[in-house]
Image (tube, rainbow, N blue to C red):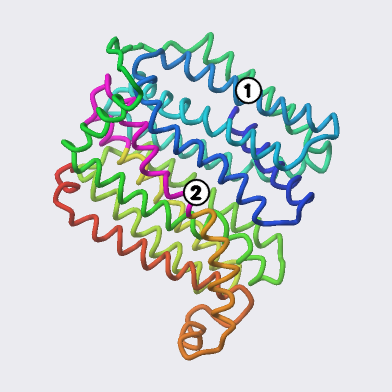
């Protein structure tokens, strides 16, 4: 419920900001501000999370994020809301997420038996992708009916609901660490020392950083403008493709939530990623109509819950509970550090490199046009071709890493 409210607010803020600036870069910067603060602070919060009650951290973090939504509503009602206000509040929300997400991950490990971690990860994927499908439709309807203010009020109501459920109905069996460090860097060092010994986990984090970079390079920025360019501005086609992304994730989440735990967890991570790039990105690149783009959307998103479930199962089995906050925080900093770069670089490469190159008419362009076509947006389609090949290669090569294979 709370995630649905936050997602609707995020979508409505995109609509509002684009209506003010008509700039795609302004939208990218909103996401960028959120991720930069999140990734940077993730390095320092692990020790704090291990030493304090996870429930308290989650309640306080969510409350501060809610104050951010309240601030946006206040600026809006006072007719003083500007895009830079949203950037600043997104930085604060990124900071709260740096505390909330690893605390939530550790709490999950305390509440869920280890043999059920994979199933619970599938349920989380199902929930998150259900939000992906429904939040844009609900937000668009409510934005037209009552504007940004109505959606912010609904977001705040969903926060109050989730806050009360966590406060009054959920008990987390805390295991608070007594050890006090002289500086936050000591906790970071201990997290990295653990990863030096568990090289397989470190290699998973590093390869997942590359995979996240590839996916954000295209799907975060390029998918929507590419579909619009190749469909002559058909917003219905874009809506169908985005819905199929969510449907694929829902289907994958349901399968993971009911299937037995994999015996080859590490290999399953990279086979799933390879299939996502192979059938998702490559079909998206060569597709010429909404049917094939929808097939590609399902193919790209369906394997993702398998990636998340198998990675979470490995982490919860291998990391001692007393260290999970530090290691999960370092994991977030490593794996998600490439996302802000991908978000900014994707838009730049599309506008200033690939689209101009595909209009240059040289021999390589004519060869690429056989694959991606010669219509508008074929430069962005060529980007999907590149990320598909690179992401597939990284995934398959990772399968043969001996330290990663030991984690099976």
Q: Badge 2 is on which residue?
A: 340
Between the residue at mark 1 and the residue at mark 2, the CA separation in whole angstroms equals 27 Å
SS for dot 1: helix
Q: Is residue 375 left or right of residue 285?
A: right
Residue farthest along the bottom direction in this orientation: 363
Residue 390, horizontal then vertical, whole percent: 36, 65
Residue 289, horizontal then vertical, whole percent: 60, 71
Looking at the rendered image, the quarter that the C terminus falls into is top left
**Which residues make up the magenta segment?**
312-341
Looking at the rendered image, the quarter that the N terminus falls into is top right
Q: Nearer the viewer, mark 1 or mark 2?
A: 2
Residue 151: within the magenta? no
| Picture quadrant where residue 236 is located | bottom right
* Magenta residues, dominant SS class: helix
Ranked by sequence position, the earlier of labels 1 and 2 is: 1
Which residue is depicted at the point 52% across and 42% down? Answer: 129
Residue 90, horizontal then vertical, whole percent: 61, 36
Q: Is residue 379 left or right of residue 235?
A: left
Residue 282, horizontal then vertical, whole percent: 44, 68
Residue farthest along the front direction in this orientation: 182
Q: Badge 1 is on which residue?
A: 159
């Amino acid at each position: 419920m709370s995630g649905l409210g936050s997602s609707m607010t995020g979508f409505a803020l995109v609509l509002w900001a684009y209506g003010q600036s008509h700039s795609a870069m302004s939208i990218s910067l909103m996401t960028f501000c959120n991720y930069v603060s999140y990734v940077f602070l993730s390095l320092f919060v692990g020790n704090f999370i291990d030493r304090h009650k996870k429930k308290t951290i989650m309640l306080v973090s969510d409350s501060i994020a809610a104050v951010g939504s309240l601030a946006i509503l206040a600026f809006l009602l006072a007719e003083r809301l500007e895009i830079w206000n949203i950037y600043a509040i997104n930085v604060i929300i990124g900071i709260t997420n740096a505390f909330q997400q690893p605390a939530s991950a550790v709490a999950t490990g305390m509440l869920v038996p280890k043999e059920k971690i994979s199933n619970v990860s599938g349920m989380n994927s199902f929930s998150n992708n259900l939000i992906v499908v429904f939040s844009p439709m609900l937000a668009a309807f409510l934005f037209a009916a009552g504007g940004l203010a109505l959606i912010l009020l609904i977001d705040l109501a969903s926060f109050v609901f989730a806050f009360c459920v966590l406060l009054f109905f959920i008990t987390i069996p805390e295991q608070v660490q007594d050890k006090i460090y002289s500086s936050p860097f000591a906790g970071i060092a201990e997290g990295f020392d653990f990863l030096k010994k568990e090289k397989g986990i470190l290699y998973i984090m590093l390869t997942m950083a590359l995979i996240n970079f590839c996916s954000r390079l295209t799907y975060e920025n390029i998918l929507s403008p590419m579909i619009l360019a190749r469909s002559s501005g058909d917003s219905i086609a874009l809506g169908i493709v985005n819905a199929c992304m969510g449907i694929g994730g829902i289907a994958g989440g349901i399968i993971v939530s009911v299937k037995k735990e994999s015996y080859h967890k590490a290999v399953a991570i990279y086979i799933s990623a390879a299939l996502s790039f192979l059938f998702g990105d490559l079909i998206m690149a060569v597709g010429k109509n909404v049917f094939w783009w929808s097939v590609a959307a399902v193919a790209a998103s369906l394997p993702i819950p398998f990636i998340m479930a198998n990675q979470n199962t490995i982490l919860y089995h291998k990391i001692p509970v007393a260290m999970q906050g530090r290691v999960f925080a370092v994991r977030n900093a490593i794996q998600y550090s490439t996302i802000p770069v991908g978000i900014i670089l994707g838009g730049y490469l599309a506008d200033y490199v690939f689209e101009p190159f595909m209009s240059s008419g040289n021999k390589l362009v004519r060869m690429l046009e056989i694959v991606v076509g010669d219509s508008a947006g074929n430069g962005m389609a060529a980007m999907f071709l590149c990320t598909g090949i690179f992401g597939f290669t990284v995934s398959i090569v990772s399968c043969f890493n001996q330290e990663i294979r030991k984690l099976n």
